[in-house]
Amino acid sequence: MLGFFKKNKADSTIGLMTTVAAQKGSKSRFHKLRVADIRQETEDCVSVSFDISDTTAFNFVPGQYLTFKQEINGEELRRSYSICSSPLENELRIAVKRVPEGRFSSWATNDLKVNDVLEVMPPMGNFILEPTPAQEEEYIGFAAGSGITPLLSMIKTVLQHSPKSRFTLFYGNKKTASIIFKNELEDLKDKYLGRLDIHHVLSREDQGNDLLFGRIDEARAKSLIDKLPSSILPAGYFLCGPEEMIHNVSDAIKNSGADQKKIHFELFSSDQASSKLKEEKKESSSKQNLSSVTVVLDGEKTHFEQKPNDFVLDAALAAGADIPYACKGAVCCTCRAKVLEGDVEMSMNYSLTEEEVEEGYVLSCQSMPRSSNVVMSFDD
């Protein structure tokens, strides 16, 4: 498995929701959803809810995301955004934070209106938390910026569905005004007294506590973990945010003696993705042996030939296959497929678990053929 970390699934189950296993059979096709509500969460972030009254395709598990397709200035863009609502709320809501030069996020935060219709894939993703009602469990969350989005879904579900369990959240931002869902988090803390602890770590605003002033680096994460009551034995650590924070917090947790299998994470971006992709392309040659590749999607087969240093996703799209994808950066897992025949090599992997890789799953956006014949299925 290439990449820096393993992303593990939570082991528990929740009877009120559609499980990930059940969703694997659903087709990754776009549905048209109407925007039901838009809220301004911070100066540069909005949350958006959708009307899903006429479809069951959007049942989800806390931590999953939606993939959107939108034409902006004549170009089709695809982006993935995590769901921030709980499955128990009968609402499907995401948050979009505007990023510098972000074409989709700028459009969504400035131009999107109620009653607009967007093309959306059903929920996907294995960064999940499924609490069990009868268990008394402790969960620890680390988030930075918009990384709070999937954790909010997890927090609300744990508090409502598992009355004996508790959640501790460490949430990094620049200043108080940039804290997404600040009021909602405080309301949850007040509603579920003693079951939700929130620690805001601000990098540009001194709160009078040195431990909570600065970025969440490894040393700070270790200090925060060390200050947890000794009675807390976490059932899982859930991390979401930029790659650097994920590295820092994951290392701090592992160095504290925690079982690595309890660390679950999702990157919102990878700083190394674009540079490595460029290096891979530099190495390609026009005089390479071609591989015969077959991809299976919704029972239909598409055959094509491709160079060994081209990615299967790009070649499949060029051949006319409507392969599901979003980030093309090894982060979102939308383009996951299973290798049925032949060998492929993944350039990067930030989203598949070690178990999935051992079972033959790959990210098609990062997979290059390494045998003369390759067959991959997007239906498994």
Image (cartoon, rainbow, N blue to C red):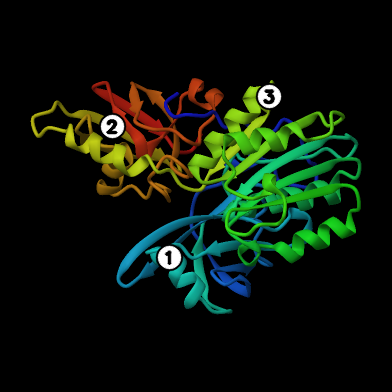
Residue pointed to by mark 3:
256
Q: How many marks?
A: 3
Displayed quadrant of residue 95: bottom right
Tag 3: Cα neighbours inside 10 Å, few (<14), some, or many (≥20)? few
**Residue 216 place in picture, x, y as percent:** 59, 43
Mark earlier in primary sequence (1, 3): 1
| Amino acid at dot 2 | Val
Asked whether the residues under the numbered discs 1 and 3 touch, taking CB atoms below 8 Å apart as contact, a structural biologist would say: no
Q: Residue at x 17, y 33 (%)?
A: 284
Please, is residue 337 above or below residue 68 in the view? above
Q: Nearer the viewer, residue 131 or 290?
A: 131
Would residue 255 be seen by someone viewing this image from the given angle?
yes
Labels 1, 3: front one: 3
Q: Tag 3: residue type? A: Ser
Residue that carries the numbered disc 2 in the rendered image? 293
Distance, label 2 to label 3, CA atoms, is 46 Å
Q: Which residue is mark 1?
A: 104
Position of 105 with respect to 72 (left or right) is: right
Q: Say whether residue 161 is left or right of residue 347.
A: right
User: Tag 1, which secondary structure?
Assistant: helix
Image coordinates of residue 172 in percent, x first then y, are: 62, 51
Quarter of the image with the N terminus in it: top left
Q: Amino acid type of disc 1?
A: Phe
